[in-house]
Image (cartoon, rainbow, N blue to C red):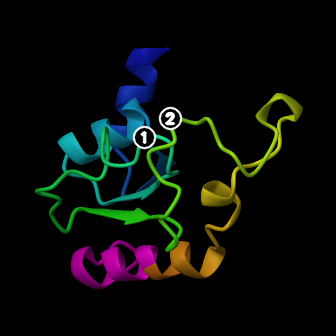
Amino acid sequence: SLLEAINIVQNAKLIIGNETGLTHLGYLSGIPTVCFLGGGHFGRFLPWKDFNSLVVPVYWDNTDCFQCKWMCEFVDLSKKETPPCIYNINETKALEAIEKLNEKYKIFS
């Protein structure tokens, strides 16, 4: 339920998610958050202009095709193919984001 999700997020040491309500809730609850961002609506919901160090966005470096509104010209979404802006987010970037938050907030100490 929504109340259970809120309770879990508010008691977490770290939130890892995509650009959803639970990621926003993590930020608003003061929980260090790693957020995976695709390019479809990049900048509309996240990342915010006034991002602080509590949320680390993780996204593909090649932003040429961002703002496509999920009408990706590189894949056939009707066949559930993954857009390159999602597919090319790698584990190295994710681990770097987690480490950055851990250094600042001592999550794993």
Residue 30 - label: none
Instruction: Name which quarter of the figure residue 3 lies in.
Output: top left
Secondary structure mainly formed by the magenta segment: helix
Question: Between disc 2 and disc 1, whose residue precedes?
Answer: 1
Query: Any magenta on residue 103?
Result: yes
In front of the other: 32 or 60: 60
Query: Any magenta on residue 24?
Result: no
Q: Identify residue type, mark 1.
A: His
Residue under label 2: 69
- In the rendered image, residue 107, in percent from the top left (x then y), is placed at 35, 72
Residue at (53, 68) in percent of width and height: 60
Q: Identify residue type, mark 2.
A: Lys
Left or right of 23, for residue 82: right
Quick one: SS at disc 2?
loop
Tally the marks: 2
Residue at (44, 22) in percent of width and height: 4
Which corner quadrant holds the C terminus?
Answer: bottom left
67 to 106, vertically: above or below: above
Which residue is outermost to the right? 79
Q: CA distance from mark 2 to mark 1?
A: 6 Å
Left or right of 62, for residue 101: left
Residue under label 1: 41
Quick one: SS at disc 1?
loop
In front of the other: 19 or 5: 19
- In the rendered image, residue 67, in percent from the top left (x then y), is placed at 44, 45
- In the rendered image, residue 30, in percent from the top left (x then y), is placed at 19, 50
Mark 2 touching mark 1, by CB under 8 A? yes
- In the rendered image, residue 31, in percent from the top left (x then y), is placed at 27, 53
Graded by Cα atoms within 10 Å as few (under 14), some (14 to 19) or many (20 or more), the crowding at tag 1 reads some
* Residue segment shown in magenta: 97-109
Residue at (21, 51) in percent of width and height: 48
77 to 39, vertically: above or below: above
